[in-house]
Amino acid sequence: MITDFSSHFIDGIRLDVSLRNEVRDLGLEDAAVICVEKDNTLSGFSSFPEHWWRHYIAKRLYLADPIISFARKSQAPMDWDQVIDAVGDPAVFREGERFGISRDGIAVPMRDPDGRTVLINAHHRLSRRDWKLRRTNVVRSLHLVLTGYAFILTQLKRDGRSGDHRLSVTEEAVLDLHLDGWEMTEIARCLNLRPRTADVHLRSALHKAEVGDRESCGRTSLLADRIRRGEEIPALVRREI
């Protein structure tokens, strides 16, 4: 079974809507983000039409999805037609066509810091010529998108189960630059993140300090030092901006 986070919210936006906005900014149609745990359990979310995503889960098509199998073995991007050529005519693609999803797409996998397989599987309707021209840039952008969503999935799964106030390496870097007065676009460029991903890391760091907004940091390095040491931070009084 897939633990489905599609209807969960991040920064006031449903994950399925956020993902759809990301991929359509790249000229793609829809996508799914799937995380394969070390015990082979799955979690993720999707911007594909809900009736297809529900069908995919209900019929357990993920159990025989060759894209997931290939992603476990390699971190190389995989065009859907390459997967079809390698394994024949997979049921998941035949079923997808019944729901109006063509056989044009790409999967970009990665390993997260905990060693789990995470992939973004995106559908497009570009011509072969256009896809050839845009593929390299799209793959690079999808990898950045996936990095951010992999972090979000980890946070969702840990939500309510961890009292750890220590910052991750990325959270620490984002918070440091923020406290130094950097704009979010500058932070994202410096750390090779998308601005939305950098913002998620900052919000996570502030959440660990029980701070509801950026200005409540007081722009002081003392707060950052206390968070890094894992100290309990009392709730701060929020200022009207």
Image: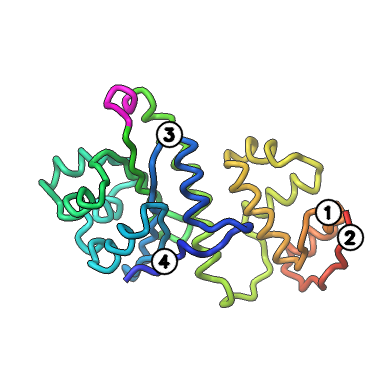
How far apart are the alpha carbons under marks 1 and 4? 34 Å
Give above or below for 240 relative to 77: below
How far apart are the alpha carbons under marks 2 and 1? 8 Å
How far apart are the alpha carbons under marks 3 and 4? 25 Å
How far apart are the alpha carbons under marks 2 and 3? 41 Å
Q: What kind of residue is marked 4? A: Asp
Q: What kind of residue is marked 3? A: Gly
Q: Which residues are magenta?
A: 126-132
Please give the residue where the numbered disc 4 appears in the rendered image: 4
Residue drawn at (30%, 57%), measured in percent from left and top? 52
Residue 215, which numbered label? 1
Q: Residues within 10 Å of mark 4 (few under 14, many from 20)?
A: some
Give the mark, 1 or 4, whose residue is nearer the N terminus: 4
Residue 117 placed where, x, y %?
A: 37, 57
Q: Is residue 176 left or right of residue 30?
A: right
Give above or below for 161 relative to 59: below
